Structure formats: structure tokens, C-alpha cells
Amino acid sequence: MSGRLLIIGGGLAGLAAATALAPRGWRITLVEARSQLGGRASSFTDPNSGQAVDLCQHVSMGCCTNFTHFCEQVGIAHLLERVTTLYFMTADGRVSQWRADGLPAPWHLIRSFLRAHFLSRSDKLSIGWALAALERFSPQSDPPFMEWLEEQGQQRTSINCFWNVILVSALNEGIEQIGLKYARKVFVEGLMKHREGGVVYLPKVPLSELYGKEMQAWLKDHHIDLRLDCPARQLLIENAVIHGVQLRGGETLEADLYLAAVPFYRLLDLLPSEVVQQYPVFTRMQLLKTSPITSVHMWFDRPITTYPHLVLLEGISQWLFHRPSGVAGEHYYQVVISAARDLRGWGGERILAAVLEGLQARLPIPAEAKLLRSRVITEPHATFSVEPGVDRWRPDQRSPIAGLYLAGDWTATGWPATMEGAVRSGYLAAEAIMQSEGMRVRFLQPDLA
Ligand SMILES: Cc1cc2nc3c(=O)[nH]c(=O)nc-3n(C[C@H](O)[C@H](O)[C@H](O)COP(=O)(O)OP(=O)(O)OC[C@H]3O[C@@H](n4cnc5c(N)ncnc54)[C@H](O)[C@@H]3O)c2cc1C
């Protein structure tokens, strides 16, 4: 008989571990500080309409096999929309379409690539050589990617209009800061290895609904004691053994095993400071850096484009999404600015003005179109930064404290900070927990084959 497990954190990492372990007989309590599940992948309520609006649009891809498995297991996969064509728009308003065609991998995107209007023939040739070299490069080496691109003779246009465009969205980090390991993962394992790898999946509903009622019903059906609005204050640790979790409300919860599935900077607050100082695993975590994302939400009185989304080249933003508004007569658009460090100190009005100026320059927005309202949201610690060698700071899901396991997109998953990375961490933690009972179970899903 499996024991009692206390999970702290109801983001995708904690939820994935719960969905893996509950069917194996673990009696699970999950405490979540906020009033909803989903963590960073969640929504706020728009006070004007009462509608749930995502803090930031989340995108998944075909290569995210663990996230897909998680959604299927919980029964929420039907809430995802498969998007096979992407529209890349330059500042002059010209658009190129990207979609996989009938050719086998790695050639399935070659026709779109060759037709891309924003790359010259010589850019395409040199990018092609560099992609082939990237594929041959050791997947574990992690030198600065920019230096490597320069060694491969990549010119400014191909760096700006190809490498950076894809990487800044996928990794939420500027190309100057990225290590080669995760850049390689995006291009080779994400886009080139399998024709389904680069297919985009968008939630059809707000994230609070994606990880909402159906998710909670699944947890209930599997006898998981879910406690929302229930923040943990401290992990109670003595002699390298965890024996309880004190909640902010004063109560102490005890279990046989504990899984901390909170962001690394929250875990550092929950651990007693002497424990952080004592174990290199925890002191190293302090060296992880974070990167911000800004999302600009705009409600217009009419459509401003007929495209369902746009990948925006040459400007401060990377994506424009046209999403359902839920209010008659309103058209809702969201612009995403990844690795938004340069906007620090700008303030919402200046960011909105810059975004609108960029959109007006490239879209035929009718002069009479009225911006009804807007909101600018910056998540300062959106993801950890995939700087060169970052994996040396990321801990395994087994901690040095007996009884305490770790999960979160920032733990050692071999993936960048994504919903896929978070689910992987939860499955890996669940495997480690099963192993503590002497059982070898594989929850991690295979890559696309
Ligand atoms: C703006 C933005 C855009 C993004 N876009 C994408 C995207 O397009 N595609 C993609 O794949 N990924 C994207 N990500 C990344 C993705 O959201 C994260 O990688 C993933 O959701 C992390 O899940 P997690 O469970 O590891 O952590 P979190 O989601 O942070 O979950 C941790 C949970 O722990 C809870 N918690 C914290 N402290 C306590 C406490 N003391 N007691 C109890 N509970 C606590 C938190 O409330 C939270 O619910 C984006 C992230 C952001 C911020």
C-alpha cells in the first residue's frame, strides 16, 4: 500500500505528479496558494467583462509529448486546437506561411523555408549549413549560442529574422544570453526531427478553464484532497529529514513523503535558511536567473487583422494572437513580448504605445478602429534563463533531504521552462517517489518517433 503524499503547488509540475501517482494508490493532499490551478499558466478576470483572460497566451507543440499525455490522461486534450500553419509578418506587412508538407523529416519544412520572403538566398544557404552543423553538434555541449552562430558565418539578417525570432519565443531569452544546448533542442529535436514536432497547439479556452473544472473533477474522482487558497509557510526539516509543512494559516500538515512543486525562488523561502546554506543543491539554485515576459491585451471595436495569429518579425513583439473575446462587439488581441528585459521601467502606457505603433505600421487597421480598453502585464520571473551551462544549477527531483522531492520546470528535465518541462518534472518526481517504495515505474513519455 502506497503512503500519504503532500504536494505543495498546483502548477503543471504538481498536477502532473498527482495524476501519475493517484492511480497508483498514493493518498494525496495538494496545497495551492492561489484560488486556481495552473500556476504561471493561468488567467485573470477582466473587470470590465467578467471574462477570464490569460495572463499570457500559452502555446504548446507536437514535440511536447509529456504535456500531450497529461492532457489526454486528464481528459482536457479536446480543449486544445491544432494549428498547422503559422504566419510570419515583416514590418512592411508582407507575410510568409510556414507549414509542414508531405516530405519526410527533416525536410518537411524546407518548402516554407525556401519561400520565406524575409531571408535572402544566401541567408537560406548559410542557415541550411548551420542547421546541419547544429544537428551534428553534441546535444550536451552548451557554449554561448551567439558565438557559435558567428563561427558558422551567420549574418545579422539571418540572426535577427530566423534564429532569434524562433528562439526568443521558444526559450524566452535573448539570443545573446542563450546556450547552444537548448537552442539545439528547439531546432533539431523540436522542429527538424519529426514532422509533427513543430505543430502548434493553442488552448481553445482560457487557461483557467483548461486547468479548471475538468481538472478538478479528475482530482476529485481520484480522491485527491485539493486545498486552494492554502499557502505553505515553511518546510519543517530536522536532521536532514522533512517531517511536516507549516501552512500560513498556522496548521501543520504531515505525510509520508513531500513534493515541493513551487518555483525555485519560492522554495528557497520555504526552506529553513540553514538548510539552504548547508546543501550545495540549494545554494546552486540561487544562481538560476529569470527572464520576464510582457503581454499586451487589447480590446478593439472591430477586427484589426484577418489573421488568427502573426509571428511578428522586426519589432519589439514576437506574436499577435486574435482570441475569442466572449463579449459581443469586442475583438480581443494579445501581443506577447518575450525576454522583455529592455522594457523594464517603461510603464504600461509606453509599452502599449510602442506596440500599437508597430501594429499600425504593418497592419491595415481602419482609421476609425477604436481601442476600447487595454491591459499590460509583465511577469518578471516568467521562466528561468537558459544561459550557457544553466543545467549545472538545476537540481534532480530527489533532494538531499529525506522524504522531500522537488518538481518544477526549473528542476533537471533536459527541457527549457515550458509546460512540457513542468509536466516532465512532475513525472520524473513521481518515478523517484515510486522508486522510494522499491518500484521502478516509467511515467515519462517517449519523444515523437
Ligand atoms: C508569461 C508567461 C508565458 C509563458 N508562455 C508559455 C508558452 O507559451 N508555452 C509554454 O509551454 N510555457 C510557457 N510559459 C512557461 C510555463 O507557464 C511554465 O513553464 C509552467 O507553467 C511552470 O509550471 P510549474 O508547475 O513548474 O510552476 P508554476 O506554474 O509556477 O506552479 C507553481 C505553483 O506553486 C504555487 N505556490 C507557490 N508558492 C506556494 C506556497 N508557498 N504554497 C502553496 N503553493 C505555492 C503557485 O501558486 C503555483 O500555482 C510561460 C510562462 C509565463 C509566465
Image (tube, rainbow, N blue to C red):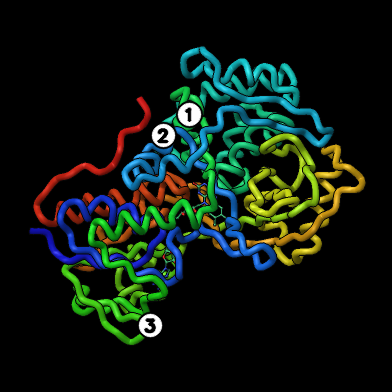
Mark 1, secondary structure of its residue: helix
Q: Is residue 310 left or right of residue 55?
A: right
| Mark 3 vs ligand 1: CB below 8 Å | yes
Is the residue 251 above or below the residue 290 in the image? Answer: below
Reading the image, the residue beneath label 1 is: 188
Q: Are marks 2 and 3 in contact (CB under 8 Å)?
A: no
Q: Are marks 3 and 1 in contact (CB under 8 Å)?
A: no
Instruction: Give the residue displayed 39% in from the left and 43% down from the top.
Output: 67
Instruction: Give the residue displayed 66% in from the left and 58% down from the top.
Output: 341
Across and down, in percent, residue 390 comes to: 45, 51
Query: Disc 2 versus disc 3: distance between alpha carbons?
Result: 43 Å
Query: Disc 3 versus disc 1: distance between alpha carbons?
Result: 45 Å
Reading the image, the residue beneath label 3 is: 248
Across and down, in percent, residue 115 comes to: 69, 18
* For discs 3 and 1, the disc positioned in front in the rendered view: 3
Mark 2, secondary structure of its residue: loop
Where residue 139 is drawn, which disc sits there?
Answer: 2
Camera-side residue: 268 or 62?
A: 62
Instruction: Give the residue displayed 73% in from the left and 54% down from the top.
Output: 298
Mark 3, secondary structure of its residue: loop
The amino acid at mark 2 is Pro
Q: Are marks 1 and 2 in contact (CB under 8 Å)?
A: yes
Across and down, in percent, residue 83 comes to: 56, 32
The disc, 2 or 3, on the residue closer to the chain's N-terminal end is: 2
Q: Residue furthest front?
A: 328
The amino acid at mark 1 is Val
For the residue carrying disc 3, how many other residues have a C-alpha within 10 Å: few (<14), some (14-19), or many (20+)?
A: few
Instruction: Report the quarter where the N terminus lies.
Output: bottom left
Camera-side residue: 2 or 387?
A: 2
For the residue carrying disc 2, how many other residues have a C-alpha within 10 Å: few (<14), some (14-19), or many (20+)?
A: some
